[in-house]
Image (tube, rainbow, N blue to C red):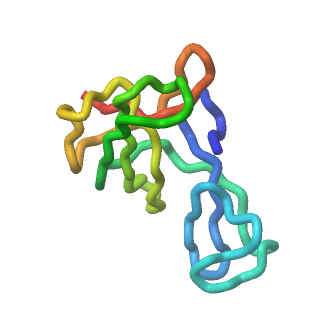
Amino acid sequence: MVGDMTDSTLAASTCAVCGLVAVPPEPIGCERCGAAAATMEHTFVPAAGSVTACAVVHHHVAPEPPTPFVVVEIALDAGPVVRSLLRGASPDTVVIGGRVTGAVDDAGRFAFVAVG
């Protein structure tokens, strides 16, 4: 879930009991401590972090995005780990540990892009 697309944030929830930050927000309750959904506080976290893993998709059913494309696992600076497209990346340019940030393209689609 994307939050305010103008400042590259992601919708999240924080458990008031144990402090777990979850992206996307946890609708049922805390997966770490089991606290009820009512204890989850809706928040936003910056869409910035570091690449921890990547995969190249060579074939898929949909026409968009065109193949090959790169899917990355990102450790957000706020703590959670998410998976996303890495827009504008070719398979040989992805750097494990590289910095990425969220961006919305002209069509309103969110994805991460490499920083620098």
Residue 11's place in the image compared with 15, above or below, is: above
Judge by depth and name the residue closer to the eye, 41 or 84: 84
| Foreground of the two, 72 or 105 | 72
Q: Is residue 68 above or below residue 12?
A: above
Q: Which residue is painted at 38% across and 56% down in the image?
A: 75
Question: Is 53 above or below relative to 21?
Answer: above
Q: How many marks?
A: 0
Quadrant location of residue 101?
Answer: top left
Residue visible at 35% across and 24% down?
88
**Compared to 116, does 78 lie above or below?**
below
What residue occupies the far top of the structure in this picture?
Answer: 106
Q: Is residue 94 left or right of residue 23?
A: left
Quarter containing the C terminus? top left
Picture residue at 65% right of the left edge, 72% below the top: 15
Apparent side of residue 12 relative to residue 40 in the rendered image (left or right): left
Q: Nearer the viewer, residue 15 or 24?
A: 24
Taking the spot 78% from the left edge, 73% from the top edge, the residue there is 37
* Residue 90 percent location from the top left of the image: 26, 28
Percent coordinates x, y for residue 31 in the rendering: 62, 77
